[in-house]
Image (spheres, coloured by chain):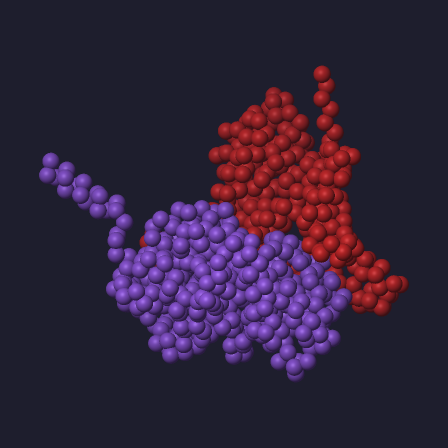
């Protein structure tokens, strides 16, 4: 009987969720057509939390726990993942999909769990007065469009009047995000904008690139994802479009996008919100506490890639927000609502990045009640096919807020009106 | 000559070439449907699996390396050798034949005389199994496939058309190669189907399983044969599409491009797959060129299906499909 009782107690203890832990769900996609991009991000995200547990003993003395759920980059599965993991004490969701983000915005708002869509999702969610539970720091698609034009202005001596700029985009909500901003910027700077949608998945783009060959734009911008990126870069090479005049958004600028094209991808440019490579002090810690201990996520072969670093960066921002939340509320075991407060008070400075072993890894920015979008900065990187690596060729560029802010205001206010949302931060 | 006409000519030529690439995928569907009445949902995944295997063999990758490393704590990834493209293609073909044998042995032979919908469901299962197997064997990273096929602008056509019209046409070298390969494939498959003993047996099985069995034709052998040929066609399609976009899991989605071709050309005709591919290729490209700008572009995916449906209204069996006559 005694033995039975002991076994029962042990079973109950094993079955009960551990009380002292901070839960970070990872809505990842390691399978399906976009797995090649989902894996490095998920690995970087998981490895950072492992590092925090192994090196620091967790956050504020409490261990973190990743709950990974496979979405296959499918919106319905993403929502299922949210529903099945939120009960575990999830502190923050980072769904890595614009489609899933749109579906989760009303859900997280109702459930009181913060959502962080880093460089994707609904751009106007950066207005914290309307979107209390949604954050998209450090940058968003409209900022990306503005940064591209600002970079081109720099290349063209500040005058792009009469220049032709084409946008090749994934024909989806994601791909259409920059259009409005680019139209406004075209009015401001006098360039001619042509729009070239590519249907999902983007394996066949001959029509679009024949049109580019005929119209000879001065620059081509790209909002692509998955196979669309590789095919576009290959087609650009085929028609001999100058690669240094071809600029992709940060989701069109990983090693996966250029390596299949080989030497012809040399010179292709893309924006990035985090620096690529493994030349950062944090990698010494990762080696010591994660890789050498055999605790790396996945196959452990993604370190230093653009998307692995982005996963690290996303996790790092989540951990910093959790630390801030602990500091604000004076408790180690924080709730999702406290996590939200931490995110809203996040301040990423150069000194902080140095201390974290990631000097200049991302832009300096701060978040506030009204501004959930951060500074919006990004760098331009260029592919060196011979060396097989991305070189960062610009400083962090600040977007044209005079164009972006009114657009964000307009869109978010329309959302607030539709959904009867009371404005905050007054 | 007016510029618009020149551009339309260039678009038409590129449409023909794109159509050939669609037809390459459609051919695999036709072969299996013709021989067994099965709509093989796994054909796109077979192209992916073949391409993954080809790259894996060429690069000397250790199959199931991640699994082996996870179980035994090893760090092996490659054998340390490179295999020449031709030898790798032959080895991949052997793998596809082995796959055909496995499909027959473990799936199809247990489903003889089942309803077509059951067989179709079995191929759905096969598609997901193969996708997972490919992932487990070779990993899910995007791989560059280089079997030495030229890619990019064909300078001769560019110069020639520039001399004639003052505007050089863009034709991709890879598309030209694909056209030649498709032509050889169609001729080869037609000759095989019409004139060889196995080809005749294959057609007999397609007409009536029971009758074919009664005259001593081995159903098992014929099905292994036809799945092997479909595997070979999948390998060819995988090489062409994989060279274009890198070998990655979205390669399986090329099957979507083959469906309107099949609807139009018929499920049972090898030349129908080619003609259907050409009509779809030219139709969607010209529509995008002429009407696309007026409706915001990106018309190709849906227009291909509209075009196929239009043909279906007048010929439900497809352009070259066999007319089904049910006698009471």
Residue A166: where, in percent of width, then height? Answer: 68, 67
In this picture, residue B234 sits left or right of residue A276 = right
In this picture, residue B145 sits left or right of residue A425 = right
Residue A91: where, in percent of width, then height? Answer: 36, 57
Residue A347: where, in percent of width, then height? Answer: 40, 73
Extreme-top residue of the structure: B328
Which is nearer the eye, A218 or A405? A405
Residue A229 in view: no
Residue A207, quarter of picture: bottom right
Q: Where B205 falls versus B28 (above or below)? A: above
Kindly identify the residue that appears in the image at 82 percent across and 64 percent down: B161
Extreme-right residue of the structure: B1
Q: Where A140 falls versus B116 (above or below)? A: below
Residue B34, quarter of picture: top right
Q: Colour of chain A?
A: purple
In this picture, residue B313 sits left or right of residue A82 = right
Which is nearer the eye, B205 or B6? B6
Name the quadrant of the N terminus of chain A. Answer: top left
Kindly identify the residue that appears in the image at 69 percent across and 62 percent down: A195
Which is nearer the eye, A364 or A170? A364
Residue B166: where, in percent of width, then height? Answer: 85, 68
Extreme-bottom residue of the structure: A157
Kindly identify the residue that appears in the image at 75 percent across and 67 percent down: A215
Q: Colour of chain B?
A: red
Q: Where B62 falls versus A265 (above or below)? A: above
């Amino acid at each position: 009987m005694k033995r039975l009782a002991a076994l029962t107690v042990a079973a109950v203890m094993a079955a009960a969720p551990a009380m002292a832990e901070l839960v970070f769900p990872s809505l990842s996609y390691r399978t399906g057509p976009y797995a090649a991009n989902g894996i490095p991000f998920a690995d970087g995200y998981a490895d950072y939390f492992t590092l925090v547990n192994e090196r620091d003993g967790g956050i504020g003395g409490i261990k973190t726990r990743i709950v990974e759920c496979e979405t296959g980059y499918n919106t319905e599965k993403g929502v299922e993942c949210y529903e099945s993991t939120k009960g575990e004490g999830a502190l923050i969701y980072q769904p890595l999909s614009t489609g899933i983000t749109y579906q989760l915005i009303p859900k997280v708002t109702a459930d009181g769990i913060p959502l962080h869509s880093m460089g994707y999702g609904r751009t106007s969610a950066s207005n914290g007065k309307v979107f209390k539970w949604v954050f998209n720091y450090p940058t968003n698609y409209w900022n990306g469009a503005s940064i591209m034009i600002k970079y081109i202005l720099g290349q063209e001596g500040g005058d792009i009047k009469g220049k032709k700029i084409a946008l090749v985009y994934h024909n989806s909500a994601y791909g259409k995000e920059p259009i409005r901003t680019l139209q406004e910027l075209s009015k401001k700077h006098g360039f001619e904008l042509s729009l070239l949608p590519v249907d999902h998945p983007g394996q066949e783009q001959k029509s679009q690139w024949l049109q580019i060959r005929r119209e000879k734009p001065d620059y081509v911008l790209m909002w692509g994802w998955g196979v669309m990126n590789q095919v576009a870069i290959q087609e650009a090479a085929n028609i001999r479009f100058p690669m240094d005049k071809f600029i992709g958004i940060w989701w069109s600028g990983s090693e996966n996008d250029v390596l299949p094209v080989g030497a012809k991808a040399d010179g292709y440019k893309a924006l990035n919100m985090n620096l690529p490579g493994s030349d950062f002090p944090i990698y010494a810690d990762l080696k010591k506490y994660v890789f050498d201990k055999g605790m790396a996520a996945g196959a452990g072969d993604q370190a230093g890639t653009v998307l692995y670093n982005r996963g690290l960066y996303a996790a790092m921002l989540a951990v910093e927000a959790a630390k801030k939340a602990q500091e604000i509320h004076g408790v180690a075991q924080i709730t999702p609502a406290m996590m939200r407060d931490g995110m809203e008070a996040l301040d990423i400075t150069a000194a902080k990045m140095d201390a974290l072993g990631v000097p200049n890894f991302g832009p300096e920015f701060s978040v506030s009640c009204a501004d959930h979008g951060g500074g919006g900065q990004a760098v331009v990187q260029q592919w060196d096919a011979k060396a097989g690596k991305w070189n960062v060729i610009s400083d962090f560029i600040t977007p044209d807020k005079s164009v972006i802010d009114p657009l964000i205001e307009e869109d978010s206010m329309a959302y607030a009106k539709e959904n009867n949302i009371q404005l905050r931060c007054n | 000559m007016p510029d618009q006409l020149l551009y339309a000519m260039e678009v038409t030529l590129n449409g023909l070439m794109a159509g050939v690439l669609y037809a390459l995928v459609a051919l695999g569907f036709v072969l299996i449907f013709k021989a067994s009445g099965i709509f093989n949902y796994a054909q796109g995944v077979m192209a992916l699996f073949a391409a993954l295997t080809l790259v894996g063999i060429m690069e000397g990758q250790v199959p199931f390396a991640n699994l082996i490393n996870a179980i035994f704590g090893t760090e092996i990834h490659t054998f340390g050798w490179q295999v020449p493209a031709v030898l790798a293609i032959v080895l991949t073909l052997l793998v596809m034949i082995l796959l055909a044998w496995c499909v027959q042995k473990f799936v199809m032979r247990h489903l003889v005389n089942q309803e077509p919908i059951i067989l179709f469901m079995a191929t759905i299962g096969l598609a997901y199994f193969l996708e997972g197997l490919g992932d487990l064997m070779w990993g899910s990273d995007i791989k560059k496939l280089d079997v030495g096929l030229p890619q990019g602008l064909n300078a001769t056509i560019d110069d020639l058309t520039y001399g004639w019209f003052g505007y050089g046409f863009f034709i991709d070298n890879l598309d030209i190669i694909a056209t030649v390969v498709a032509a050889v494939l169609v001729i080869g498959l037609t000759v095989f189907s019409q004139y060889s003993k196995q080809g005749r047996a294959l057609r007999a099985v397609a007409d009536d399983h029971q009758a074919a069995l009664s005259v001593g034709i081995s159903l098992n052998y014929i099905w292994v044969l036809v799945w092997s040929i479909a595997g070979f066609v999948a390998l060819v399609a995988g090489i062409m599409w994989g060279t274009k976009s890198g070998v990655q899991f979205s390669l399986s989605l090329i099957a979507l491009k083959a469906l309107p071709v099949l609807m139009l050309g018929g499920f049972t005709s090898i030349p129908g797959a080619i003609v259907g591919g050409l009509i779809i290729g030219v139709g969607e490209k010209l529509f995008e060129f002429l009407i696309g700008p007026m409706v915001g572009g990106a018309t190709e995916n849906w227009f291909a299906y509209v075009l196929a449906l239009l043909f279906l209204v007048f010929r439900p069996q497809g352009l070259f499909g066999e007319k089904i006559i049910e006698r009471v």
